[in-house]
Amino acid sequence: MTDSTEDIISTLLTGAVEHLDIPEDLRDKTVSCYEDVGGSLLDQGGDLWSVYPQGSFTLGTVTRPPNEDGEYDIDVVCHKAVKKTSTTQEKLKDEVGEMLEVYEQEKADDDTDDSPILSINESRRCWTLTYDGFHLDVVPCVSDEEYPPTSILVTDLKLRPWHHSNPKGYADWFRGRSPEMLRALEAKAEEIGVPVVPNWTVRSTLQRMVQVMKWHCALHFADDLDNRTPSIIITTLAAHAYTGETDLFTSTINAVGNMPKHITEEGGRLWVRNPAHELENFADKWHEYPERHDKFLSWLDALATLLDDAGDSAGKGLDHLVDRLGEAFDLGLLRKSAQRMGLETRQLRDAGKLGMARNAGALTIASTSAPRVQKHNFHGPTQR
């Protein structure tokens, strides 16, 4: 089968976005630090407490920070299984902060620690532990007894009521949006002999699509960070709009066109509802800052235009396609992806498995009826 323009764009984007994954050594380091922090909190707090990750790391949609000095952001839930009437947001926040201070002192006294905490800071919803290359946002919460079994109430010192959330339910919903991901997770679990594996252990078209969108969004808003669309809005709308495609280009361009349809208006406010909790509105700040919704739509339009132009580039050559995509994505990453495609093509040719589609002039995996591409040995200047 001949590779279409859509197939080539999908391969280019997939190859590039793989470089945006958190590096394996740093991922292992973050997991180790998260487990260490969690262990300390549980030891200090006792049986009422539980600690688990949430956000893009859990979903398998982490993307590299857009600048070299940026840090990977890992979100951690610190849950105390008590009623909200038994404490206050301030008291719970202080309780977690005090346990983290004890943990920080223990690490400072450990001369063998190879992952020192650089700082601990408080924000309106969490405590942030900063390490070299990443930070852990530890979010204190209590049980949301009105929405069992996995909903939580999160501290937010700028809000009088507790903030509703359900990260476990959200991760389940996200996973369920992709039959491809479910199959991959089942295969992974069978491979390593465990009943369940986390989302981040596999990569599906939906996960890659979200990474592509987050990547483009980060670069689009590089000089306008206050108005950049939060990744949870992108992830939620993209997952709603995803219809099961396994081709990255097609899934992305289709989702971009359908994402606004999943924004609702209720009581004069725009809503991007948490599909796992009816009271959580991911777009709550759009009411206070309506220009952020306008800029979200403008960003989607820019991404749609880019993908449309790329899809219309048939016959103009790979260099043209890479340069066009590079205007909005990272040109260096796309060139690396294109170079890898070239290497894989050469390997197929050397193995005698690359053919020329009849009447098309496009490279394809050879069948018994396709004419063979002759192996060539020439050395010329490398095109850059």
Image (tube, rainbow, N blue to C red):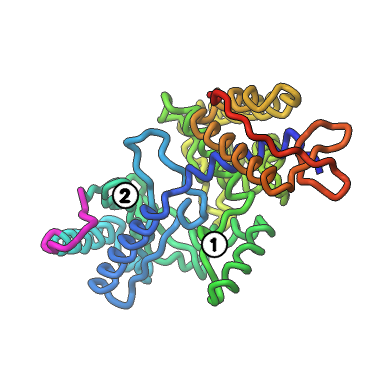
Relative to residue 84, is residue 230 depicted above or below?
above
Where the N terminus falls, by quadrant? top right
SS type, badge 2: strand
For label 1, the residue is: 169
Q: CA distance from mark 2 to mark 1?
A: 24 Å
Q: Residue 63 appears at what percent x and percent y?
A: 47, 44
Q: Position of residue 189 (x, y in %)?
A: 57, 71
Taking depth in this image into account, of 123 and 235 the one nearest to the observer is 235
Q: Residues within 10 Å of mark 1 (few under 14, many from 20)?
A: some
From the viewer's perspective, is 162 left or right of 128?
right
Q: Which residues are magenta?
A: 108-118
Say if the magenta span includes residue 22.
Answer: no
- Examine the rendered structure and indicate whether residue 280 appears above or below residue 194: above
Q: Amino acid at mark 1?
A: Gly
Which badge, 2 or 1, is on the more N-terminal residue? 2
Q: Is residue 106 left or right of residue 175?
A: left
Q: Residue at x 31, y 57 (%)?
A: 89
- Residue 314 quadrant: top right
In the picture shown, does residue 310 fall above or below 207? Answer: above
Label 2 CA crowd tier, 10 Å (few <14, some 14–19, many 20+): many
Asked if one can make out residue 269 in the rendered structure from this viewpoint, the answer is no
Point out residue 367 in the picture as x, y percentages from the top left corner.
83, 49
The residue that mark 2 highlights is 135
For badge 2, the amino acid type reads: His
Q: Residue at x 70, y 39 (%)?
A: 375
**Numbered mark located on residue 103 in the image:** none
Q: Quadrant of residue 275?
A: bottom right
